[in-house]
Structure formats: C-alpha cells, structure tokens
Image (spheres, rainbow, N blue to C red):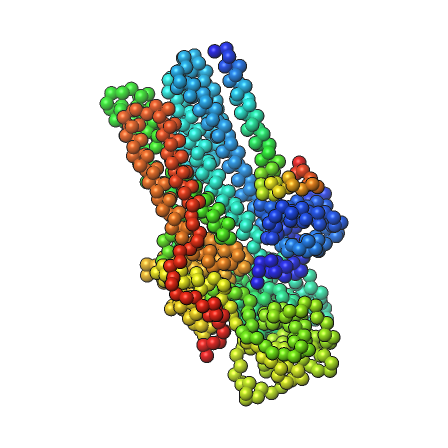
Amino acid sequence: MSIATQNAEIQGKRLDEWLILSETLPSGLKRTTLSVPDLRCGACVAKIERALESTDAVASARANLTLKTVLVDWHPHEGLQAVLDAMKSVGFAASIVCETSTDSEAMAKRYLRATAVAGFAAGNIMMLSVAVWAGADEATRYVFHVLSAVLAVAAVAYSGSLFFESAWTALRHRTTNMDVPISVGIVLTLLMGLHDTWRGGADVYFEATTMLIFFLLIGRTLDHSMRRKAESSLNTLAQIMPRTAMKLEIAVNGEFSKPHPVPCQTIEEGEFLLVSAHTRLALDAVIVRGESEFDTSIVDGESQPKDHKVGDELSAGVMNLGEPVIVSVIRCQQNSFLNRTQRLVETATAQKGRYESLSEQVARWYAPVVHLAALMAGLSWYAAGADAHTSISIAIAVLIITCPCALGLAVPMVHVLAGGILFRQGVVMKNGAALERLATIDTVVLDKTGTLTEKSAKLASEYQLSDKHALILCELSKSSSHPFARAIAATCLVDDIKSGMKDCKEIAGKGIQAVHEGVLYRLGKPSWAIEKLSDSTGIDTPQSRSFFSANGRLLTQFDFNECLRSDALSTIQKFADAQVRLCVASGDQHASVANIADLLSIGEIVSHASPSDKSNYVEHLKQSGRSVLMVGDGINDTVALTAANVSFAMGDAGDIGASSSDFVLLHSKLGGIYTTWRLAAQAKRIVTQNIAIAVVYNLVAMPLAFAGWVSPLIAAIAMSLSSILVVGNSLRLSLFDNSSKPTSKKQISQFTTVANLHGAK
Amino acid sequence: MSDFLFLLPLSLLMGLLALGAFFWSLKSKQYDDLDGSAERILHSDDKPIL
C-alpha cells in the first residue's frame, strides 16, 4: 500500500483527532499544518492554494514546497472535512502534522544569524588586516586595530556564544568536547588581541578568531540543516498509531451511549471503546462485544489476518478488518504494548552504549594535545629567557594555528553531501554518524512481512468465470477492504459496476455475501462459502484460500500470495555477492518465512520471533563479533532496530519504524539499502582523508608556531588553505556513481519473485 | 588619512546594512520555502508573503 492511499484511508477516520490537534488562533480561526506528500511542483502549489481559498471554510492557505506542507487557517464552524474535500477535489491526499518542530526551526535560524554575523565581522576585519599587513603607518594601524577589536568583540559575543554554551554544558557534566578547546582558544586570543591593541602592538589575531568562528559555524549550520531536512521529510510519513479513540459510556440501563472521541492518554483501564471497521486499536484491550478479523502484521509480523471473539486480548496497533467491536481497555497508554516496546527500545539504546563517531574520537585526543603543546611552547620560551608577553604570544600562536577549522568542516561537509545524494534516492538519513556505522557492517538481518514482502497480498493465479459471475465478483470484492478482497478487486478491469445485487453485507471472519436474481453469492472462507466441503476440494484448505460460490456451489477458488518487493531479489543478491552474511528474522510461521528465505537463497532464518527474540538474536550476532544492519518495519521490529549497529525502516511503515531507525526508505525500495551502504564506504574514505589532511596540516604548522615564525598573515593563509583543501576533497563525494556494478552473473528469474504463502507444504 | 576616515565608516555601514537586510529577510520567513519561492515567481495570481 502506498503512503498516499494510506493517508487517504486515514483521512476519513481521523477528523476528530485532527480537530483536537489543531491550534486555535486568537481570531477564533483554527490553524492546521497539513502534510501533503505529493506536493512536488510549482503548479501544485497554485492549484492547492486556489482550491482551498475558494472554499468558505478556509480563511487562508499557504503551501510550502520545500517541506511539502500546507498551512491552513480555517473557520471551526465549517469543519475540517471541507478543507480535506477541497484537497481531494484537486487530487491530493493530506494528513495532519502533529509535531511542528518550532524548536529546531528557531535553532536553524539562530545558526544562520550567527554565521552571518561571523562572516560579516571576519570579512571586514580581514579587509582592515590586509591594509595593516601591506604596511600601514603606526597611527593608521592603531585605528584599524581598534575597529577590528570592536567587530571581533561583537562577533565573539554574538556568534561565539553557541560554542560557549555547548562547552559550558560539557564542563558542567564533567566531560569535554570539541567546543572546550575552541572556546578557550577564542577567548584567549580575543583577550590577547585586546591587550595588544591597547598597548599599540603590531600583531593582533582578530581575523583568525573571527574566521575560526565563521568556518566552524558553516560546518555546524550545514549539519543542522541536514538534520532538519530529514526531520521534515519524516513528518510526511503516515502516522500509524491513532491518538484518539471512540469512548463509550455506560448509560443507566446498562446500554452503551453514543461514542465520542477522546485523546488516548486520558483513557483509563476498564473503560470501553468502540473499534469501528478499518481503524486501529489505540490501546491494549479485550473484546467484550462482537467478533471480527484483525490485521496484526505491524504488531507480530504475521501475514495472515486473525479472527478474534469476545474475551480475546488485542494489542494496541492491530487493525480491525471486519465488523465494529466493543472492547474494554486493560492497560492505559503508559503500560500499553507500544509503550512497553518503547521501554525495551530505551534499554536497548542504553546497552548499546553511545557510538563514538570519528570526529568525537579525534576531538578526544585533540584538546589535550593542543593545550599541552601551547602550554609547553609558552613555558619553554619563558624558560629560554623570553619575556612573559612574548611567551604568551607564542602559546597563543600555537593555539590559533592548530585551530580545528579543517577538522570542523571535515566531517559535516561529507555528511551533508551524502545526505543530499541519499535524499534524491529516497533515503532519509537521520544523522551523519549512522553513515560511519553503516560502513562497517558485515551482517544484514531482515524482517519478512512488510520488509521483504509487499504489504498487500496478490492473487496467485488467474481465474475463469462467466461474464455475469465476474461482474458480481468484482462488485462483491470492491465492497470490502479485506486484503484478499482488495487483491481480487485489483484484477477487475471495470470501474463502475451496477449488476443490481442486493443485501450486500460483510460477515466478520467469514466473507462477503450478496443476493443477485435470487441467488446467494458468497466470497470468503471455504467452510462458509460452500455448504459441504467435498473430498475433492479437501478439508485441509490453507488459510490463504478464498472460495466464490453461488447458493453454496463452488464457482471458483482463489489462492493468495505474499509478494516479494520488486527489488528484494536483486538487492539480496548484491549483498550476498559482497560476502555479507544475511538472515531473515520474522514473527510469522516457519513455513512462510522459510519459503521467502528460500526464494532469496538466504540460509539463516528465525521464525515465530517476538520483538525481544529478534533483538536477542541481533545481540547474539553482535556478541559473536558481527556488525549488524537491521531492516524492518513494524512495531515488532523496533527493539531489534535499536539494538542493531545501524538500521533501516520502510517508509510505508509510517512513523513507527522511522522513530527507531537511522535511515528511512521513503519509497520502500530495498535497493536504497545497497546504494547507501556503498555511499557509506565512499564517505568513510573521504572523511578519513579529510581528517588526515587536518592532522598533517597541524603536524607541519605546529612546529612553525612553536618556533615563533607564525605571524597573523601566515596563520590566516594556513587556516584558509587547509579548510579549502578539506572542502574540495569532500566535494568529490558528489561524483558518487549510483549505478551498481554488475557483479552477479547469475540469471535472476522474474518468475521466482512470487511466492506461495504455503508453498512449503 | 583623511580619506579613509570617511570611507571606513561608509564601508562598515554598507556591510551592516547588508547584514540587517539578511536578518530582516530571515525573520520575515523569506527563506522558509526556497523551492516554492522559485516556482511562485511564475504564478500570475500569487500573493506576496509580506
């Protein structure tokens, strides 16, 4: 199922929820941010805005093409339905954005402003400095230095505060980070420069200080903007879990009152909820009235819908496929299955220990080495008989020349470029460190249902029916949204059918039936559709089989397949060729897991796995020295996704998988995993080269500063050169060739991509 | 000497003006939708953000 249809499906169900989540403006209007994944062109912007503003319900609408959102101010008495209808009339599915991250937006703007101020100050100070270096007389030099001092103080106070805050936080927690030596360097150089300006000295390092801040902020701003872009594109994913539920009160006569929507977190244990057809259950509950069929795939990975009746326990996240049922809540949201899983995720995160990225590893030895070197330089000059001022000047020259300009750009530049390349391929990278971890993996663990296979079932073979029966079948199947009925409806060529059938109804856990010209037609479970199962049809029919009957007489039968995703085979093949160990871990039954694994020639399988089984398996692999990549989609994968060294989630899994993984495949194309893996290897090479450049630069520059040969001019040239070198090297990543190498000579048959669910029998 | 007493403040002032313009444009949400702005220029009935 595509994200768009999922959203369209959600559209109708969640109006109440959206009303609760909309912001109320002082003017009495409601403000809602709609996410529109299909907003891709300038014409769409105009079309949507025109359509929305021509309806009475909407006061104003503004589409954002970058974030794929529409900000709508609407009149509450008109209702949100009118807004959605207007969207639909121009052909766009929309869903509400719940968390507009205003914090991260404010932070992005702060970074931009800080970079602009630092750039302004650095540019102007450099202009003044060049005049001084060119040989200004003493009075002019003094004026220029004073002007530079004013600019430098402003830049350090405004832009430098970002580093000071971060350094202070680190120190307060008794740790150190890259910002500590940066802050020390900035403050010391500034103080020294101010002192020398006041004394009328010849050499001040104001341009070095501001340039350092400017370069470092460019790196930080790029890094931050990359994360924000990832965040906003993940916001367009469907939100799977409902945030409200239909609550039922018990009236005096013991009957249930009319349902009304309430937010999930306010629902207590023992309260009653109505779960209507095609909605997801929001909390763990037990059925008290009615029976129906449930799609549990996102909870336990089983591909087959399951029947549940009064007294059965249901987990939050299951989707009701049949009749409405009334349930009694057994766990409030805090203790629900989803939240318990969330806690397991937290434990897994804690056990994993924080991954130390390459830049952090470098930062760890960088600070002590540089500070010690500066101190030694100062002390040795003092010991050799230089005066205090000269000694301190030398020490500061060492600090400046070893400034981590290049180092500050070495990693973020590569990550931002990689993020951009991946984004164009439909892969969202949530943070750059994940790319480093991905480069080291040697084992891939894949979930089956919804990851290797499509979310929806497909018809296994063609069927033969008379035209009349085919029409009835089409109309019957179109009236249901059961996965099997949908698979049949997908084969219908006629869109608008009126065969004149009556009494069409869906019977939970059985099928659909209707009367046409006095004949009762049924489509559903074999035992229900025909009166007596003859020996020829066999009592032991698989669950993935449906019968179509007229008055209890079999017309035809259907078998359904789980369908491999189109690029599953080629992707697996490429990983296998690269000598990567592959495993399938699924909550589904052994036969269907083995069947899929067989098709893909994957030897290792784990079936019937609970969420913790999966993560234990991943842990076990890690303990045996493997570096594990986990690919999954549902709730039952989240713990394993977190436990693995690095993880991918499928985009059509919506927000659930995305929250616990490092990468999200927006278009659910498995091929993206292999591309990302190759890009990660390339990125790692370039990052290592960049760090090597920065280190070599320091090794050359430090002795010069130690010897006292570094003037402000030399420092400025050296800093710029090393930074340009690093940026230039990073840009090589954009030459990354996406076309995968044709390493496999094996013929990949198109026909093996369809697997019968129970083919292993 | 007397020339750049006049020119220096002028150059700094121009720089500050540019910086101010950037701050203002950032604050008035002109950088919020760069892709959209590029397309909106082609719409005949587009209304300005300000």
Q: Residue furthest top?
A: B2
Q: Quadrant of the N terminus of chain A?
A: bottom right
Q: Residue furthest left?
A: A384
Name the foreground residue: A463 vs A404: A463
Residue A714, x across and y down, in percent: 35, 26
Seen at 44% across and 24% down, the residue is A126
Residue A84 seen from this side: no
Residue A77, x across and y down, in percent: 75, 52
Seen at 69% across and 64% down, the residue is A259
Residue A707 seen from this side: yes
Within the image, what quadrant is residue A178 found in?
top left
Within the image, what quadrant is residue A748 found in?
bottom left
Q: Is residue A1 above or below residue A505?
A: above
Seen at 60% across and 40% down, the residue is B38
Q: Is residue A579 left or right of residue A488?
A: left
Q: Is residue A269 above or below residue A547?
A: above
Q: How many marks?
A: 0
Seen at 51% across and 32% down, the residue is A116
Residue A682, x across and y down, in percent: 38, 48
Name the foreground residue: A506 vs A277: A506
Residue A348, x across and y down, in percent: 42, 57
Q: Residue furthest bottom?
A: A535
Q: Is residue A47 above or below residue B2?
A: below
